[in-house]
Image: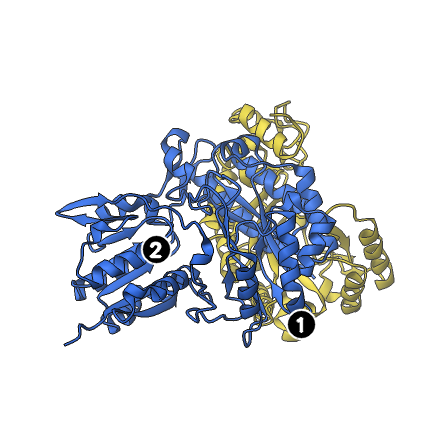
C-alpha cells in the first residue's frame, strides 16, 4: 500500500537465479549527479501521501562509490522513506549499517533466492552467500533497535522453478532474520504454476503464523482460492497485469495477473475465479472503483 | 482492647509505567469517609501487567489483607483471576472484591465462574466500595450495600443498582489528596464521565448514559498539581473526547497554556477529529497537545451503521490536515472484525488513513466487551468471540478466522513500514 519510486543506481549484479538468467552482467553505476537529480525530481513531483518514498534499486547500492551522498541527497530532497534494494552483505559492517541508518535509510528490500544455503548459495553461485546476507540484515536491525530507529525489511524472493520448493524455508528465514514482510515475485514464465501453488501457500502460511506478512505477485486470484488477500491489488502497491491468455473475468481490474510467459494450457485447466462475485465487489470497493 | 483495622489491599495491574486512576478514586473516597477512619487500613499495589501472577500474589499475601480489591479490565483479567485463585488458596479468610469494566457488566457470570471471588462491584465504584468496607469493617451485612453482586446463602444475588454520583466534585481528587503521586508520562486526569457517542463496541461511556463534569475549579486545581509535580513533563487526559465542546476546549487550553509555556506537553488525548478545524487545532496546540488519537475504526458503511458511528470522510481528512498544520501528530485507529465489515472494508480503511498520512496508524482486532451493545447482540450479529477475556473476536459473518488473522498480520506489517520514515 505504500508506494515507492524505484530509481536504479546502476545495472548488473542483481541477485537473480543464475540458472534462469545466466551469469549476472557486469556491474556499472550511473553518475551520482544524475541519480540525485532524479531523486530530487521524484520528490518534487510526488503527488500522494504518504511520501515521497524512494527505493534505490538495480545494481547493489552499496557498490556505488557515492552512496552516502545519494542518501544525503534523498533526505535533502524531502524523501520520507528511503529504501535500499540490496543483498545486505555490505551491512555486516557496522559502519555501513550504522551509517545508513544515521543518514536516513529506513527500508531494505533484501533479495534472497531461498531459505537454505543449498538453494540460495547454489543459485547465486557463491558459497556462504546466504549466511553473509542474513548477518547483514541482522546487523542493520540490531543497530536500528539500539538506536530506536524504526525500520522495515522486506525479503524479496524472485520465484522460479529452481527455488519454488524452498519458498516456505525462505519465509521462515525472513521471519528469523527479522523481516516484517516477504514478497514472492514470480520471475519465471515457464514455472509450472499448479505445481508451485502448494509451496506458495505454505510460504504464505509460514509467514502468517509467525506474524510476518507474505505478498505474492504474479498469481491470479483464480489460482489460490482462500488466499486472495495475499494476492489482492488492494494490498499490493504494484498494479496487476493479467496475461493475454487469461479470459475475461470479474477481477480484470484488480487481478495480480500471472507470469508473462504463462501458457494458455496452464490457465485453461484451472477453475474459474472462486467467489468472483463477492470478491470483485469487495476489491473494487476497496479501491474506490465500485459502489456497494 | 481496640479492634485492629481491616486491612484492605487494593490491586491494579496496569500497562507498564502507569498507575491506576480508578484505584486512586476509590481509595481517596474511602479514606475520606468518616465511617472508615481508623477502621480500615489501605495499601495500594500498582503493578504492571507483565508481572507474573504468582509474584503478584506474593506481594498481596505479604500484606496479609482482610479484603483484596482489584480493578479488572479485559487486558488484565486472566492474570487477576489467577491471582485470586492463589490468594484464596493461601488466605481463604480474605474477602476478594472485584470491580471495573470487565466484571461489572457481567457480575453474575464472573461470580459463577470464579468461586474465590466474593463480591463484584457494578458500575461507578467509589460510594459502593466505601459502603461495602463500612459493612465489612463493622461485621455487618454486605447484601445491604447497593450496586454489588455477591454470594448469599449459596446463591448469587444482585443488590439494587446504585445511582450515579450527582456531583463529581463530591469525589475527592486522587492527586490533590496525595493518594496518587503523578509520574512523568503516566499521570492521567479525568474531567468528565460519560461519552457523547454510543459506539456499539465500546464501553468507554460505561453505561453512564449522560455526561457529568467536574467543575472548572477542580479541573484547574488538578492540572496545576500534576503540571507542577517534580519530574513531570508530560501527562494526559483520560476523557473519551478531549474536544467535547468548543467552550470546553477553550477552557482546557486556557488552563494548560501557562504550563505549556514552560515545556509541559500532553500526549495521546482522544479527539473527535471531524470537529477539528484550524481554530480547534490551534487550541489543542495551546493546550500542549503533541499527539491525538482518533478513529475512524472503520469506513465500511454497514459497520458504521451497525456500530452507530458517524463518519464523514471529507471532515475527517480536514481534521487531520488542520492538526498537521498545527504540528500535532495523529494516531488513526482501525478495528478489524466489526459487524458488517469484510476484510476488504478493513483494507479500504487502512488505505484511507494511509493516504491522509496522519503520523501513526494503529489497528486492533475487535474485542467484544462486557456491557457493550455488541456483547448483547453477538449471537444476533453472528459474532464468534472468546468468552474468556480479552474477548477477542474469532470470526464474523464477513471475515473468517483465517482472514482475521491475516488482516492482523498485514496491518502490523503495514504499520511497521509506515512508521519507518525519516
Q: How is the image coloured?
A: by chain
Give the number of the disc on residue B127. Answer: 2
- Considering every residue shown, the one lying at the far front of the view is B34
Q: Nearer the viewer, residue B251 or A137?
A: B251
Circle 2 or circle 1, nearest the eye: 2
For numbered disc 1, what is the local secondary structure? loop
**Chain of the residue on which disc 2 is drawn:** B
Q: CA distance from mark 2 to mark 1?
A: 38 Å
Q: Which mark is residue B262?
A: 1
Camera-nearest residue between A272 and B252:
B252
Name the one closer to the observer, A63 or A25.
A63
Q: What secondary structure is found at the residue carrying circle 2? A: helix
Quadrant position of residue A69: bottom right
Q: Is residue B80 visible?
A: no
Chain that is blue in the image: B
Indicate the chain on which mark 1 is placed.
B
Q: Colour of chain A?
A: yellow
Does residue B263 sit above or below B121 in this rendering?
below
Residue B281 seen by the camera = yes
**Crowdedness of circle 1 by 10 Å Cα count: few (<14), some, many (20+)?**
few
**Quadrant that contains the N terminus of chain B:** bottom left
Q: Residue B133, position in %: x, y?
A: 26, 60
In the image, taking residue A14 as reference, residue A279 lies left or right, namely: left
Q: If you read the primary sequence from the N terminus, does the residue marked by circle 2 or circle 1 appear first?
A: 2
Q: Left or right of A84: which side holds B54?
A: left
Q: Is residue B181 left or right of residue A85?
A: left
Q: Quadrant of residue A83?
A: bottom right
Amino acid at each position: 500500500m505504500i508506494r515507492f519510486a524505484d530509481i536504479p543506481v546502476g545495472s548488473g549484479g542483481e541477485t537473480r537465479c543464475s540458472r534462469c538468467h545466466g551469469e549476472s552482467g557486469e556491474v556499472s553505476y550511473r553518475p551520482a549527479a544524475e541519480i540525485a537529480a532524479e531523486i530530487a525530481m521524484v520528490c518534487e513531483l510526488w503527488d500522494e501521501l504518504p511520501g515521497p518514498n524512494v527505493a534505490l534499486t538495480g545494481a547493489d547500492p552499496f557498490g556505488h562509490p557515492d552512496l552516502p551522498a545519494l542518501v544525503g541527497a534523498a533526505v535533502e530532497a524531502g524523501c520520507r522513506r528511503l529504501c535500499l534494494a540490496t543483498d545486505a552483505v555490505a551491512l555486516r559492517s557496522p559502519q555501513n549499517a550504522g551509517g545508513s541508518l544515521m543518514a536516513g535509510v529506513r527500508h531494505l528490500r533484501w533479495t534472497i533466492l531461498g531459505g537454505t544455503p543449498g538453494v540460495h548459495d547454489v543459485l547465486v553461485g557463491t558459497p556462504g552467500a546466504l549466511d553473509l546476507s542474513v548477518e547483514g540484515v541482522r546487523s542493520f536491525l540490531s543497530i536500528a533497535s539500539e538506536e530506536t530507529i524504526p525500520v522495515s525489511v522486506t525479503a524479496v524472493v524472485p520465484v522460479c522453478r529452481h527455488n519454488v520448493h524452498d519458498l516456505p524455508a525462505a519465509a521462515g528465514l525472513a521471519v528469523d532474520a527479522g523481516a516484517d514482510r516477504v514478497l514472492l515475485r514470480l520471475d519465471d514464465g515457464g514455472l509450472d504454476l499448479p505445481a508451485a501453488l502448494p509451496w506458495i501457500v505454505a510460504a504464505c502460511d509460514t509467514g502468517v503464523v509467525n506474524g510476518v506478512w507474505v505478498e505474492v505477485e504474479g498469481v491470479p486470484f483464480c489460482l489460490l482460492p482462500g488466499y486472495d488477500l495475499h494476492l489482492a491489488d488492494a494490498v499490493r502497491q504494484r498494479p496487476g497485469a493479467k496475461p493475454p491468455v487469461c479470459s475475461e473475468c470479474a477481477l480484470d481490474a484488480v487481478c495480480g495477473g500471472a507470469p508473462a510467459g504463462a501458457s494458455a494450457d496452464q490457465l485453461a485447466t484451472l477453475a474459474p475465479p472462486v467467489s468472483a462475485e463477492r470478491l470483485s465487489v469487495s476489491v473494487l470497493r476497496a479501491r474506490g472503483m465500485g459502489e456497494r | 482492647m481496640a479492634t485492629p483495622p481491616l486491612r484492605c489491599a487494593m490491586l491494579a495491574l496496569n500497562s507498564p509505567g502507569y498507575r491506576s486512576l480508578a484505584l486512586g478514586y476509590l481509595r481517596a473516597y474511602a479514606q475520606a469517609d468518616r465511617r472508615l477512619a481508623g477502621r480500615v487500613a489501605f495499601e495500594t499495589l500498582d503493578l504492571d501487567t507483565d508481572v507474573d501472577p504468582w509474584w503478584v500474589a506474593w506481594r498481596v499475601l505479604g500484606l496479609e489483607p482482610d479484603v483484596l480489591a482489584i480493578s479488572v479490565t479485559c487486558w488484565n483479567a486472566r492474570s487477576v483471576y489467577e491471582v485470586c485463585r492463589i490468594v484464596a488458596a493461601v488466605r481463604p479468610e480474605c474477602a476478594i472484591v472485584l470491580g471495573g469494566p470487565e466484571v461489572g457488566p457481567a457480575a453474575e457470570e464472573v461470580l459463577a465462574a470464579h468461586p474465590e471471588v466474593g463480591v463484584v462491584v457494578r458500575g461507578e465504584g467509589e460510594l459502593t466500595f466505601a459502603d461495602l468496607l463500612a459493612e465489612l469493617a463493622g461485621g455487618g451485612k454486605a447484601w445491604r450495600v447497593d450496586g454489588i453482586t455477591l454470594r448469599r446463602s449459596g446463591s448469587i444475588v444482585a443488590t439494587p443498582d446504585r445511582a450515579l454520583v450527582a456531583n463529581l466534585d463530591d469525589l475527592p481528587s486522587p492527586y490533590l489528596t496525595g493518594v496518587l503521586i503523578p509520574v512523568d508520562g503516566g499521570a492521567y486526569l479525568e474531567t468528565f464521565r460519560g461519552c457523547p457517542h454510543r459506539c456499539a463496541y465500546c464501553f468507554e461511556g460505561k453505561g453512564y448514559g449522560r455526561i457529568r463534569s467536574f467543575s472548572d475549579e477542580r479541573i484547574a486545581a488538578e492540572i496545576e498539581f500534576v503540571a507542577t509535580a517534580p519530574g513531570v513533563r508530560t501527562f494526559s487526559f483520560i476523557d473519551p473526547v478531549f474536544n467535547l465542546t468548543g467552550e470546553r476546549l477553550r477552557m482546557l487550553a486556557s488552563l494548560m497554556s501557562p504550563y505549556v509555556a514552560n515545556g509541559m506537553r500532553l500526549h495521546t488525548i482522544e479527539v473527535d477529529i471531524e470537529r477539528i478545524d484550524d481554530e480547534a487545532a490551534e487550541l489543542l496546540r495551546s493546550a500542549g497537545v503533541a499527539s491525538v488519537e482518533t478513529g475512524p475504526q472503520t469506513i465500511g458503511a454497514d459497520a458504521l451503521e451497525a456500530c452507530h458511528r458517524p463518519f464523514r470522510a471529507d471532515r475527517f481528512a480536514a481534521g487531520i490536515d488542520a492538526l498537521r498544520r498545527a504540528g500535532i501528530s495523529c494516531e488513526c485507529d482501525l478495528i478489524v472484525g466489526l459487524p458488517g465489515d469484510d476484510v476488504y472494508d478493513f483494507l479500504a480503511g487502512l488505505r484511507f488513513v494511509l493516504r491522509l498520512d496522519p503520523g501513526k496508524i494503529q489497528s486492533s482486532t475487535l474485542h467484544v466487551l462486557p456491557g457493550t451493545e455488541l456483547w448483547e447482540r453477538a449471537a444476533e450479529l453472528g459474532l464468534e468471540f472468546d468468552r474468556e477475556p480479552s474477548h477477542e473476536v474469532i470470526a464474523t459473518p464477513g471475515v473468517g478466522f483465517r482472514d482475521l488473522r491475516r488482516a492482523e498480520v498485514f496491518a502490523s506489517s503495514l504499520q511497521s513500514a509506515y512508521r519507518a520514515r525519516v
